[in-house]
Amino acid sequence: MRIGIVCYPTFGGSGVLATELGKALAEKNHQVHFITYQQPVRLNEFNANIFYHEVRVPTYPLFDYPPYETALASTMVDVIVNQHLDLLHVHYAIPHASAAYMAKQIILKTTGKNIPVITTLHGTDITLVGRDKTYAPVVTFSINESDAITAVSDNLREETYKSFKIEKDIEVIHNFVDVSRFRKKGIDAFRRVIAPNGERILMHASNFRKIKRIDDVVRIFANVVKQVPSKLLFVGDGPERPAAESLSRDLGICDEIRFVGKQEQIEEILAISDLFLLTSDYESFGLAALEAMAAGVPVISTNAGGLPEINIHGETGFLSPVGDVAGMSQHAIDLLSNEDMLNRFKINAMKQSDRFDIHNIVPIYEDLYNRFL
Ligand code: GMT
């Protein structure tokens, strides 16, 4: 099959998922064409079946806001026609679903070909940005005009129906992880650099936006470190980082915390971690938590959105209400101070992640594609 994939090329979960899907499809001998404004971060290896088409947005003094969506739709048309694509799979509705609708109409009118468009909803395209009145009519229309709609969790499916007038069925295809990539043995020397005295290592990874509540991560860690010798690694970067750094200084724990920035080899860091913290206000799924579990790292998280679909309370980690810093702290302390329980949870986390292994989920996307060919 010749498949066009449109996504955000950044470290955000939707871009990571879309890129991993494209790579997996290419491994299965499909020809995959990424259409985006920058090389996706996870697109870091050569594969003869993978093509990358950059969307260029020429500027002009008249444009305070260069028309990205127009440039994207035009690039889609170009790639669909010249690369003979069989279908277009867009990840994150805004503005990808509406640009795809435009491209589809242009191609129908100029060539008579009806290119199937599949839209995968990821999270904030529905729960934050999409609900905004500024975008809602276009989001609703373009989702409804997609030939197939998928959501990455049951929760996101429900949220979409609640927020928009969707007339079609939304299929749930859960996110996935390449389990084999995350089953790594930690490098001892690396662990000793981070935790020279055998401290426990806690970790958080995200884009540090407000929705992640990384202040809660710092506060939980402040409680944990009082009882369990430990270190905290912050992976990623984003707008809330300065506030978190400042809070960790105010709480007198900044020497126990490292901000390691954006990292491509997240599996190396997970391999030396004992616990993953995810304190978000909302996660449609929580891909970062699934990656942690695949690496055998139990998860202390909120029970928001789709997180209960992956993190099983009392088995693979613990769930608490949003903002319950005391509860999450106590769960972390209990787990880190009980070696048997920690080991049991690690095994459970790995087993649970197997359900979402890439080899189980990618064929579901292929079946969906086949329905349109
Ligand atoms: O919010 C992010 O971290 C980025 C965002 C995205 O779309 O790039 O992530 C969303 O999609 C991920 C992949 O499907 C999910 O794992 C995240 O839970 C979801 N984020 C939110 O719902 C806040």
Image (spheres, rainbow, N blue to C red):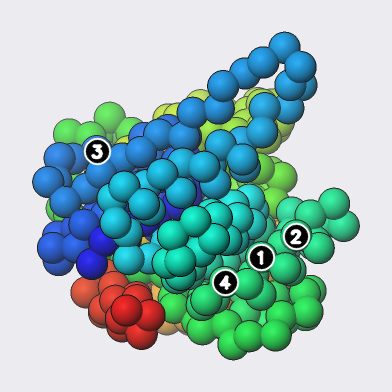
For marks 3 and 1, give the one nearer the viewer.
Answer: 1
Looking at numbered disc 4 in the image, what kind of residue is underneath it? Ser
User: Is 285 located above or below residue 182 in the figure?
Assistant: below
Task: Point out which mark residue 142 bears.
Answer: 1
Residue 223 visible within the image: no
User: Is 169 located above or below residue 130 in the figure?
Assistant: below
Residue 239 in percent (x, y) is at: 66, 32
Q: Quadrant of the N terminus?
A: bottom left
Q: Which residue is drawn at 63% across and 72% down?
A: 145
Report how far apart the C-alphas of labels 4 and 1 lie in the structure: 6 Å
Label 1 C-beta lies within 8 Å of the nearest ligand 1 atom? no
The quarter of the displayed image where residue 170 is located = bottom right
Q: What residue is pinned by disc 3? A: 44
Residue 50 in percent (x, y) is at: 22, 48
Report how far apart the C-alphas of labels 4 and 2 lie in the structure: 12 Å
Label 3 C-beta lies within 8 Å of the nearest ligand 1 atom? no
Q: Do the residues labelled 2 and 1 touch (CB within 8 Å)?
A: yes
Task: Point out which mark residue 138 bears.
Answer: 2
Q: In this view, does 218 lie to the left or right of 85?
A: right
Q: Residue at x 56, y 21 (%)?
A: 58
Q: What residue is pinned by disc 4? A: 146
Looking at numbered disc 2 in the image, what kind of residue is underneath it? Val
Q: Look at the numbered disc 2 and give the secondary structure of its residue.
A: helix
Mark 2, residues whose alpha carbon is within 10 Å: few (<14), some, or many (≥20)?
some
Mark 4, residues whose alpha carbon is within 10 Å: few (<14), some, or many (≥20)?
many
